[in-house]
Amino acid sequence: MSLYKIISPKDYINLLKTSSTRVITVDASWHMPNTGRVGIKEYFEGPRLPNSIFFDIDDVKDDKSEFPHMLPTLSIFNEKLSNLGILPNDTLVVYDKLGNFSSPRAAWTLTTMGHLGDVYLLNNFKTYLELSKADKDTFKLDLNKIDKITFLPKSDYKIEKTHLKEQVLSFEDVKNLVDSGKINDYNFFDARALPRFLGTVPEPREGLQSGHIPGVQPLPFSTLLDSETKEFPSKEELKKNLLTSFKENGVIFDIKKPTLTMCGTGVTGCIIKTALEQSGLVKSSKLYDGSWTEWATIMDKEPKYITKKKEE
């Protein structure tokens, strides 16, 4: 079961009116380095949801790691959320400008690191924008330019217990699975586009080898979301999309096996993780945080750990 919940724009508006705890809306927009777009810049310029703060996955991270937006230490997490003014029992509603791209990663980070209040994933900002066109008084937007990532005073945020053990795979965990052959005891899915998975196109990060981990199967995240709005569809539609993607990509899914996910840097892996859990096909799953960027960097000179062939 996912640690966070999906919420529609209409239910989000109702939550603002009825919640017994403070509701903080969180813009977690992030873009691939090769797009030329910058999430924090777009947050400052607007539009944004009213009273949003900005959660930067490239800032709330392990600052000792060479790999992008790896989960932070607990001390860093507490410090960064204190700087944002968040309190441990706040209800958080997370969104991103692309619809569902980086926001699942942010929601996963917040819950995995142990935030005590409810965390919701808005489904989604694009749909909210469309609703605002017809009813701007209900679905309000902030169009003002700003220069701060939070309007809240600094807090004393302190969490002591995380969900790391049940949510996260390390490089060593994955290597042990490959070396022992136990990787075949799992449904292990990679969210990257099929050409990247098969190594027929270069990785977006210059110099990074393409391909995939032996024993991992493709589950491109784009096949699971609405093609226009990037919404997560209903539970039944999600299940249908997953089964279709399995069939089209020659994936063997065993409902009895535990499930693991990954991607390029641990962002879109959270999309397929969310989809699998929301569909009911999977109760819970773990994410390989370092994902392909970590694996391909460390294993660059170890050809047996990188393949371009699809699993039979």
Image (cartoon, rainbow, N blue to C red):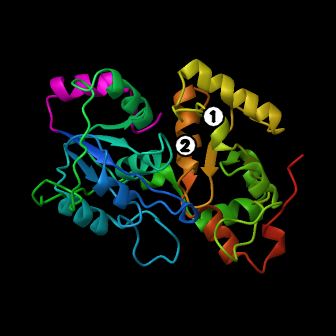
Q: Quadrant of residue 243?
A: top right
Q: Position of residue 180 (x, y in %)?
A: 76, 61
Mark 2 Cα shell of 10 Å, populated few (<14), some (14-19), many (≥20): many
Report whether 217 appears left or right of 120. right
Q: Secondary structure at mark 1?
A: loop
Q: Secondary structure at mark 2?
A: helix
- Image x and y of residue 281, in percent: 62, 28
Residue 190: x, y in percent?
Answer: 68, 50
* Magenta region, residue range: 1-22
Three-letter amino acid code at disc 2? Ile
Image vertical order of residue 34 relative to residue 116, above or below: below
Which residue is tagged 1? 224
Q: Which residue is mark 2?
A: 271
Image-based side of 23 in relation to 38, left or right: left
Q: As rendered, which of 46 and 232 lies closer to the eye?
A: 46
Q: Are marks 1 and 2 in contact (CB under 8 Å)?
A: yes
Above or below, comparing residue 229 to residue 108 in the picture? above
> Up-down: is 208 above or below 308?
below
